[in-house]
Structures are given as C-alpha cells and as structure tokens.
Amino acid sequence: MTAIREIKGRRVWDSRGRPTVEVDVILENGVMGRAIAPAGASRGTREAVDRRDGGDALRGQGVQAALRSVNGAIASTLTGMDAADQRGVDQAILELDPSPLKDTLGGNATVATSLAVLHAAAADAGRPLWQHVSGTTGFSPSLPLPEIQIFGGGAHAGRRVDIQDFMIMVPGAGSFDEVMEVTSEVYFAAGDIMKSRGKLAGVADEGGWWPVFDSNEEALETLIAAIEKAGEKPGERVVVSLDIAASEFGRDGRYRLALEDRELDSSGMIDLLGGWLDSYPIASIEDPLAEDDTLGTVEFTRRFGNRVQIIGDDYLVTNADLVREAQKDGACNAVLIKVNQAGTVSEGFETFRAAQSKGWGAIVSARSGETEDVSISHLATGLGGGQLKVGSFTRSERMIKWNECLRIQDALGSAAFVGGRPLANTWWGQRNYKDTAL
Ligand code: PGA
Ligand code: ZN
C-alpha cells in the first residue's frame, strides 16, 4: 500500500478557453498522478454536474468553489488512504457527496480527483495507465477503433445544423496507424469539397469542419462524397457514424429540425433516421431520440438494433442503473462511457461492466471541452472495450489522444488493434466481413 500524502487542485484552462479543474495526487513516496476534468456542452440532464461559480466573472464558469472542494473536504478525507484502493477512494468521495448529481462537491472536482488517484496508483506500480487499468479490472487490453468527427454540428457549431456529429470509423483498417492515415485523407477531402463549393467556413468546437449546409442530409451526402474523394468505397473499409444528440432539439416527443424548418414527432424522427440507415453506410448512431423519449428509443432499437450500433449518451449518462434499465426495456445496444458523467472512475467502470455483461458495445468518449489529458486513450485500451470517441482529426486536445494511442500501439503491438474485423451486430460487418473470425 502507498498512502496519499497530498491532494492539490489548481485552475487550468480547457480547449474552449474556459477554466477547469486539475488535480495532483502525491503519494508518501513522492510518486504523483495528475488529471484534468473535461466539460460537455450538450449535457444529459441526469449526468454529474460541474460546480461553477456563477456571477459575472469568467461568464459564470469559474471553478474556485470546485477547487475548494478538492483542497478542502476531498483532500482531508483522502489523505492517508491507499491510492491503489480506487473503489475505497471513490466510495469516500461518494460519501462526502451523496447527492445524485454530485452538485455539492462538483463533478469536475470529483472526476479530476478520482482520475488523478488512478494515475498515481499506476505510476506507483510502475505501469502505464492502460496496463494498470487492465491489470486491476481483469479486462484484456486492446487498441480501440476510433470514431472521428469530420463535420461538427448541433451545440458544437452554433446549431448551424441540428445533428451534432458526422463521423467516420475505419473498421476495415488493419492497424491504428492505418485508421489515422485514412482519416487524414477523408478529413482533407471533406475540406476540399467544402472549399470547391464555396462553403469553407472554419471548424466547430471539436475541430470538425463547420457545417455550412442547407439540410442535415446534405452533411451526410457531403461526408459520403469526401469518403469517395479519398479513394474509398463507403461501407467497405470506411463507414459512417452519427451522433444525433437528439435531446438538444427534441422534448416531449417533438423534434424541431430548425435548419429544415420542420417539426417531427417521435415516429417521424424514427422514419427519418431509418431512411438514412437504408441509404447510407451508417454503422453506429448515438442518441437517435431524446433522453426523455424511452418509447421512441425502444422502438428505434426494435426496428434497427440488429443492424446498427445504437449508443446511449445523454440517454444513459454513464449510469450503470440506467444501462440495466435500458437493457430490460430493449433500448440501445451500446453505451458511451464518459467518466465525468458518472463523476468517479469506479462508477464509470461499473457502467462499462454492466454494458459488457449483456454483450453491449461500450465506447469510451471525450467531451467537447477537452485538454491535454490523455486518460481516455488509456481507459479505452485498458478496458479493451474496442471503441474510442475523441472528436475530430485536428487540434491538439484531440490529436494528443490519438497520438497517445499510437504510443500505446508501440508498446502493445499492432496485433492488439480491434479493427480489420466486424464489430458485433453491424450490418456492414455482416455484409463485408462475415467470413472473418472475430
Ligand atoms: P458534449 O458532447 O461533450 O458537448 O456533451 C459530446 C457528445 O455528445 O458525445
Ligand atoms: Zn453524444
């Protein structure tokens, strides 16, 4: 056992220029772990909330109160505890703040501390974080298949289009390196197309191209054109993944597509997305219906769950109970794992286990507000969940996470990459890779 000697929170700044919480955890032997809280923009109503100072300064985004949580109650409670006892540490944090949304301490304070303890324990064991995660959870490590944003919309692009993420996945690639290469070609091909159509207008929050489109489907068509311009046949090596983030424009069974000036009910929304699934090689779709639309999500899963990955993000907020409930309801077949939605590492891992135990997909994910913290590259690898969502293919807060995977690949070997074979339950996998053994 190595006890925690000191916990120190400080204010640092995220990719949107907003303040956030960084925590250093220093052990008795001088070993240190450090982590930074990310921040979402399209948040689920049931996720852990960040503690922000409010008021006029820093547009209300200040984190002084969250830092007082870290340097006060959290530090005094965790000092002396065994850093290797992640569950015990997280339990102590939960006892300090039993509120369902962690709004007493602040989810930004709890997640940065919890992750920093994990880093300290890994460093103390002399292991990279991915290896420590794999060793302590018992999951076999594997390099994840990335989901990479080409166009950013919704809350990440001034709601210029309604749909939030237009992404690609490269499941046909034989290595993580190859995914990076193909993605680079598709990303720049998309930029060239925007330029030639007089529609190049910079990038959105996560670095994907700003979506100057006249309809949501035009973004999808342009993405297909970009895949083709990059020399790929859509649906073969490269497939499409969408995050609809429907809670951002849907409530009480009504969906307002502002760009197209129309409103759909739940079944209209299901039909619209179903039409896209028939027309485009979409392998994965996130939050197709709003977080309050259980019946719609169940119906969508009943109709399409056998041929597309259906991910709950705002719908499940990395909450193990909500995952188990959804599994009973027949809603979704995969969950996004954002540790800061849960608030602690142990709760994130419990949600991951709940997903895996029923054969669900589990995609470790960044937030739209990010930093140089690379924890998620290690979590995705160490848990061996198979997928990682980080945002686009530009800007250092994103690239640092892809680059970290390349470093891990050097240690693990390219055979540990999950690509080159089908992901369970995807129609393109069954069609294109049905003879490849899993
Ligand atoms: P957020 O969005 O980080 O802004 O909440 C990311 C996502 O919806 O996946
Ligand atoms: Zn999402």
Image: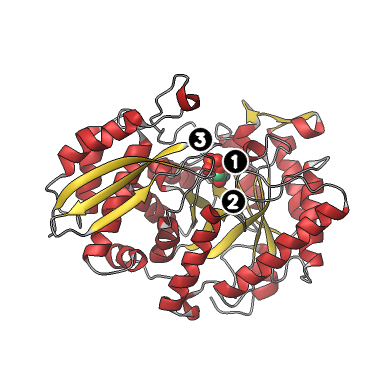
- The residue shown at (34%, 30%) is 64
Callout 1, which amino acid? Thr
Earlier in the chain: of badge 3 and badge 1, it is 3
Residue tagged 2: 310
Residue tagged 1: 297
**CA–CA distance in space, label 3 to label 1:** 15 Å
Q: How is the image coloured?
A: secondary structure
* Residue 340 drawn above or below residue 407: above
Mark 2 or mark 1, whichever is nearer to me:
2
User: Is the residue under label 1 in contact with that under label 2 (CB below 8 Å)?
Assistant: yes
Mark 3 or mark 2, whichever is nearer to me:
3
Earlier in the chain: of badge 3 and badge 2, it is 3
* Residue 344 drawn above or below residue 353: above
**CA–CA distance in space, label 3 to label 2:** 17 Å
Earlier in the chain: of badge 2 and badge 1, it is 1
Q: Position of residue 257 (x, y in %)?
A: 74, 32
Could you classify mark 2 by the number of other residues whose Cα lies within 10 Å: few (under 14), some (14-19), or many (20 or more)? many
User: Is the residue under label 2 in contact with that under label 3 (CB below 8 Å)?
Assistant: no
> In this rendering, does residue 100 appear at all?
no
- Within the image, what quadrant is residue 271 found in? top right
Could you classify mark 3 by the number of other residues whose Cα lies within 10 Å: few (under 14), some (14-19), or many (20 or more)? many
Q: Nearer the viewer, residue 133 or 38?
A: 38
- Mark 1 lies on a secondary structure that is helix
Mark 3 or mark 1, whichever is nearer to me:
3
Callout 3, which amino acid? Gly
Q: Position of residue 316 (x, y in %)?
A: 48, 42
Label 2, ligand 2: CB separation under 8 Å:
no
Residue tagged 3: 44
385 on left or right of 71: right
Q: Nearer the viewer, residue 416 or 403?
A: 403
